[in-house]
Amino acid sequence: MSRFLVRRIFGALIVMFAVATLVFIMLRLVPGDPIAAMLYDAGDPDAVDEIRTKLGLDRPMYVQYGKWLWNAVQGDFGRSIYGSRVEVSRLLMEALPRTLSLASLSFIIAMVIAVPAGLIAATRRNSRADYAVTFVAFLGLSMPDFWLAILLIIAFAANLHWLPAIGYVPLAKGFWPWLSHLILPALAVGTAFSAIVARMIRSSMLEVLNTEYMRVARSKGLSERTLIMTHALPNALIPVVTVIGIAFALLMSGTVVVENVFAIKGLGRLLIQGILNRDYPVVQGTILVVSAIFVFSNLLVDVLYSIIDPRIRLQS
Amino acid sequence: MSIKTLDGLTLIERAELERELASAYDFDSKDPLFGLSKHDMSGPHMSRRSILRLMAAAGTLTATNMIPMAAGFNDSEAVSGGTLTCGWAGVGQIVTLDPAQINQVVQFQIMSNVLSGLMHINPDLVGEGDLAESWEIDSSGTDYLFTLRSGVTFHNGDKFDADDVLFTYNRSKDSTKSIHSRVLANVNDVEKVNDLQVRFKLDKPQASFLTKTLERSSGRAMTIVCRGALESMGESQYGLTPVGTGPFKIIEHQLGQGVEMDKFADYYDPERPKLDKVIIKPISDAEPLAAAIESGDIQLIGGNPIAAELVDRFVANPDLVVDEVAGPGFQSIWINPWHEHMKVSDFNKPVSELMKEKGFMVRLAFAKAMDRDRYLKQAQFGRGTPAHGTINPAMGFYFDETLAETSNQKFDVTEAQRLMAAAGYPGGEGFPTLKLTTTPSGRREATVVADIFKRNLGVKIQIEAKEWSVNVEEFDTMKWDLRRSGSGGDFDPDDGIVDWMQTESKFNGRNRDKSIYPFGYFSDKEADELIAEQSTEADLEKRRALVRKVDKITSDKVASIFLFHPANILVHHISVNFPKQSRIPGLVDLDRVTIS
């Protein structure tokens, strides 16, 4: 197991390095000058050059890259080149809990909806319940999350005044303030996510339920509950876990639209604003963290595989 | 709901306004003090007459801003205390509050509540001492001696004195530390006389010195920063949570989440601020902003102009107050004179000569085909004023209302179509598809522009929405066909004509390849000379004549297709008493605001 983990971690680090390098180069190749945009109103070409020199952006790309990489491996991602030149690590540390909160709650909502819905749809195939779950799942998949987000705001914030429309409150300031600010965005994100997972569980369960060992188990007279929960579900979860792993990683960086609607500055929004401003250190630092989340989510999925199905570990 | 406009004035108020405006301009043009005596110009308070003259000379005299506000305010129910939560529109984060780095209105609107300047424009648009208690000016108009308020402290407890003024000056004039170093170009020297007195020496008289350069918000170069806090916090943290002497102190600032400010109990005016706490949340999208104020999550909207499509919705909401006044600035469609089909390589000819060139015919056809009323109705939901030049209604005295009728750009579809045909493109046939560059948020209104040109000239326009950094880079290097942009602006004519209409204007293709493009989007010797002349002209009548002449030339020669002048709109809940004393277009001063 430990060799398996070491090998995967090593592979993950190589992927992160490749991603970071690629992003560093691509950022500098795309058009858009961050300093000119920042000083647009000042209109002083000399100041543009002075600030470019001060930030080291006038140096050859390989020098900039070497310096950035050397600092990055020591945990220093540099400073934002925009505004107050805040440390990128600070920006990441502020954004990460917001995104983690939103992603986790979205994940919980999605699972609470998806697992029973998927099981009901699979075990009662072609029944009204199955059709209902399938219809709602397609509805959830078809609805853009930002549109659902706005509907939720209008319904629960503007009209009913039950929940706040925008913003984020850290958990440290109280559980309910934290939760109340996250319910609507998590619902907007989680609904679409639950639709995907519910469909996956349904199809995976159907496949497992039609296998020979399930027929044998059923012929042994096992209860339906034991059949589903002990024999079918663990086997059906393997492909589902893959999807969940990738989707959770996507949630950690891909909720930018919903973050925008609810004015929550998470990792996605940090990344997008960094790209729009051509804020190189912010983009590079955020991408590095996001890629780490992706590769380690996948690593976690692999570990979960081996727990759910020990044969996978033996084969590897 | 209530709306304040010029119509809200009583006859007496109108008469008073007209009398003051009339008397503001009758002085000796040779006088470097702009017709005012040393006594008139010295503080602690200046008379309304003096300020009107200074502001007129500085271009900050704006009839609509001087209006004793008519309706919509409810001072009688004002009580101190409470928390006001504001939404800052159209912005995802407040990247800095360090005056040296501020380049957006959304930032200095907050800064104005936290830091102070030597001067600040007061409720009646009278520039009065902020940290300056009084001041004296010598007869040359170049030597200003300021006496500072005593007993003022910064939010961290540091005492404010003359060294802070010098420190701020030295920091601001350093272009590596401040992006506003150019604002101080006319300041020759600043010296400390004693702990509570500083002397500014100017190279030449400057009408806008008190009301702009030293103004705490719009000036930014001399917004007083705290030496001790900068040293202990570092520039980066100071930019997030600056320490000043203003009415509110920043408690917390999380980038992208907002700014939390508490009342500064030791503010030099014990009557202010009224509120205990202010929370400012940046909200970039329009619908969430609307939902937030409708649900009561926020009670006031500051920041960028509110999305035009929301204003009528707010007006219809009985719980909200919508306060609309003329705002400064102009918005245009810029035409690249180096584009093959719109080429004008030399504007230094009479219009009659230019009219013989196909490129100019096309430019003029576009300008004449622009149905500004239709544009305003569809793109701006009827808010704003049709523009035919840079000088706008918010510049009051300088604005030429007749330009709409006399300009070459006057809307005339028949003539526009005739010009296109004369240029060889009847009904737009044979004319290439043009690219109209805008920002992603400008796509909707750019679509309206494209539709008008298609409808009136048969010309196809392809909209290219590009991120700001790319947009700016292309504009600066002249890599565009048509571009939708303009100036947010302040109240001085220089904002339009110096910044945009001179050959050496800072936006006029500043990074272009000069071997290919001898000038940027426009260049006219006569306009250049007139603009230079008006900048140093102390006689207001003469300056106005020069400004209007420039406006006419640039309009007739189609320096750009002038589109509209924006309205300034403030929206807040009826429970918020936003007093007339604080209603300065562009600013959101909260020190007098209360909640009933």
Image (cartoon, coloured by chain):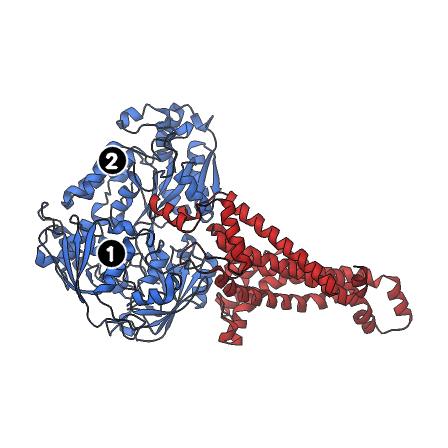
Chain colours: A red, B blue
> Dividing the picture into quarters, in which one does residue A121 lie?
bottom right
Which amino acid, mark 1? Asn
Camera sees residue A130: no
SS class, disc 2: helix
Disc sitting over residue B527 in the figure:
2
> Mark 1 — on which chain does it sit?
B
Residue at image position (27%, 62%) is B224
Q: Where is residue A64 shown, x and y percent of the image?
A: 49, 49
Q: In the figure, B461 relative to B349: above or below?
A: below
Upstream in sequence: badge 2 or badge 1: 1
Q: In the figure, A146 relative to B438: above or below?
A: below
> Mark 2 — on which chain does it sit?
B
Residue at image position (10%, 51%) is B140
- Would you call the spot at circle 2 few (<14 residues within 10 Å), some (14-19), or many (20 or more)? many
Disc sitting over residue B65 in the figure:
1
Which amino acid, mark 2? Ala
Q: Where is residue B368 shown, x and y percent of the image?
A: 35, 34
Q: Where does the N terminus of chain B fall, quadrant-wise? A: bottom left
- Would you call the spot at circle 1 few (<14 residues within 10 Å), some (14-19), or many (20 or more)? many
Q: In whole angstroms, how far apart are the C-alphas of marks 2 and 1?
A: 29 Å
Residues at discs 2 and 1 in contact (Cβ within 8 Å)? no
Camera sees residue B155: yes
Q: Is residue A199 left or right of residue B544?
A: right
- Between B30 and A20, the residue placed more toward the observer is A20
Q: Is residue B295 left or right of residue B353?
A: right
Q: Is residue A29 left or right of residue A4?
A: left
